[in-house]
Image (spheres, rainbow, N blue to C red):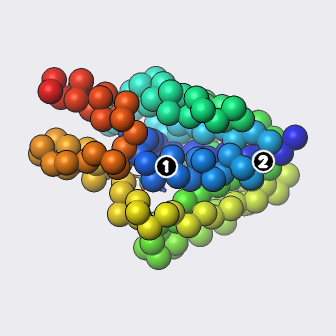
Amino acid sequence: MKKVLYAGAFDPITKGHMDIIERASKLGDQLIVCVMGNRSKNHFFTFEERSDMIKKCTSHLPNVEVDFFEGLLADYVNMHQIDAVVRGLRATTDFEYEIQMAQMNARLYDKGAETIFLMTTPTYSFVSSSIIKEVFSLNGDIEGLVPDLVLEELKRKYNR
Ligand code: COA
């Protein structure tokens, strides 16, 4: 069984992430979407809230599983015998950071997992979780850029 991993902070999940998830789910038998990072880092949504939103947003994709993990991405890959790690590329500015991370991770993988880059659909190439939170916090319109339930969660957090 071919296992693919898509990891990120997903604070919160956006339509840009959904685009990558839907496409990545066709690349292997199982796609694990993993909320990764440091619990002590200042995130707007908790680990649990973020993974819960992803679970609801991906419920129509039968081969997608949601997990969360604190630690090295490479440790997760080795522990779960992941075959490939998917990353989304939005612009050339993403590339330098991504290649550095992919090459460092490649040294740490036990069984030579591959990194696969998917080009983000242009509709969402300017989207990031931070820009979504900033625009929303200042009453800007983010409709269409995040799944509806994420918009509802943002409204709930901001008591709107
Ligand atoms: N659509 C919309 N937004 C996207 C996107 C897409 N297709 N792809 C990336 N983004 C956004 C993310 O939301 C994020 O926004 P933010 O910075 O405003 O939160 C930003 O672009 C950067 O994304 P990404 O590079 O995926 O960062 P991340 O913080 O979501 O996840 C980890 C990074 C968790 C994968 C990485 O830090 C990691 O591997 N951590 C584990 C520790 C480790 O192994 N470190 C050593 C690595 S060599």
Looking at the picture, how far across and down is residue 45, in whole percent?
Answer: 35, 31
Identity, as a three-letter code, of the amino acid under mark 1: His
Mark 2, residue position: 28
Q: Quadrant of the N terminus?
A: top right
Mark 1, residue position: 17
Q: Name the one closer to the observer, 78 or 126.
A: 126
Looking at the picture, how far across and down is residue 77, in whole percent?
Answer: 72, 44
Q: Earlier in the sequence, mark 1 or mark 2?
A: 1
Q: Residue at x 22, y 29 (%)?
A: 155
> Does residue 135 appear in the picture of this structure?
yes
Identity, as a three-letter code, of the amino acid under mark 2: Gly
Q: Name the one closer to the observer, 139 or 87.
A: 139
Q: Residue at x 16, y 41 (%)?
A: 137
Q: CA distance from mark 1 to mark 2?
A: 17 Å
Secondary structure of residue under mark 1: helix
* Ligand 1 within 8 Å of the CB at mark 1: yes
| Residue farthest left in this picture | 138
Looking at the picture, how far across and down is residue 107, in whole percent?
Answer: 73, 60
Q: Residue at x 40, y 39 (%)?
A: 147
Q: Would residue 51 appear left or right of 101 to someone viewing this image?
A: left
Q: Residue at x 49, y 63 (%)?
A: 121
